[in-house]
Image (spheres, rainbow, N blue to C red):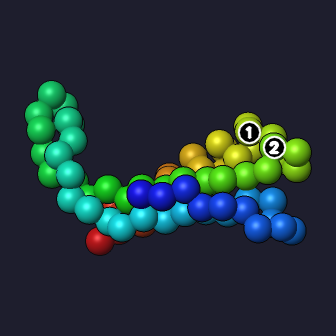
Amino acid sequence: FFTPIINLPQAAILGVGKIRQEPVIVSSEVVIRERLPLSLTFDHRILDGAPAAEFLQTLCKLIADCNHLE
C-alpha cells in the first residue's frame, strides 16, 4: 500500500497496490478474499473531495462487478 505524489500539472493520481489474500468477515464468518488496495491523491485546489470519493466508489464497483464474471 502506498500514497502516490502528484506532479504538476496533474490534478490527481491513483495508487494501485498488490492483490493479496486477506481474512474478511462475511455473514459473521471469517473467509479469505482477494483484496486490492487503492489510494487516490488529488489537489483540493482543483478537485473537490466529493467527486474524488465518487470516482473511487465507481472504480471499486466496476472492479467488484468484473470479479463476479469469472
* Amino acid type of the residue tagged 1 in the rendering: Gly
* Amino acid type of the residue tagged 2 in the rendering: His
The quarter in which the N terminus is drawn is bottom left
CA separation in Å, label 2 and label 1: 7 Å
Callouts 2 and 1 close, C-beta under 8 Å: yes
Q: Which mark lies nearer to you, 2 or 1? A: 2
Q: Residues within 10 Å of mark 1 (few under 14, many from 20)?
A: few
User: What residue appears at the point 81 percent right and 59 percent down from the top-left corner?
Assistant: 11
Taking depth in this image into account, of 28 and 15 the one nearest to the observer is 15
From this viewpoint, is residue 59 visible? no
Q: Residues within 10 Å of mark 2 (few under 14, many from 20)?
A: few
User: What residue appears at the point 81 percent right and 43 percent down from the top-left corner?
Assistant: 44
The image quadrant of residue 36 is: bottom left
Residue 19 shows which numbered tag? Answer: none
Residue 44 shows which numbered tag? Answer: 2
User: What residue appears at the point 12 percent right and 38 percent down from the top-left corner?
Assistant: 30
SS at mark 2 in the image: loop
Mark toward the start of the polypeptide (2 vs 1): 2
In the image, taking residue 10 as reference, residue 25 lies left or right, namely left
From this viewpoint, is residue 35 visible? yes
Residue 41 lies, with reference to residue 69, above or below; the image says above
- Where residue 28 sits in the image (x, y, percent)? 15, 28
Taking depth in this image into account, of 3 and 60 the one nearest to the observer is 3
Residue 37 lies, with reference to residue 50, above or below; the image says below
Which residue matches tag 1? Answer: 49
- Where residue 51 sits in the image (x, y, percent)? 75, 44
Taking depth in this image into account, of 48 and 30 the one nearest to the observer is 48
Which residue is situated farthest in the top direction here? Answer: 28
The quarter in which the C terminus is drawn is bottom left
- Where residue 41 sits in the image (x, y, percent)? 66, 53
User: What residue appears at the point 32 percent right and 56 percent down from the top-left corner?
Assistant: 35
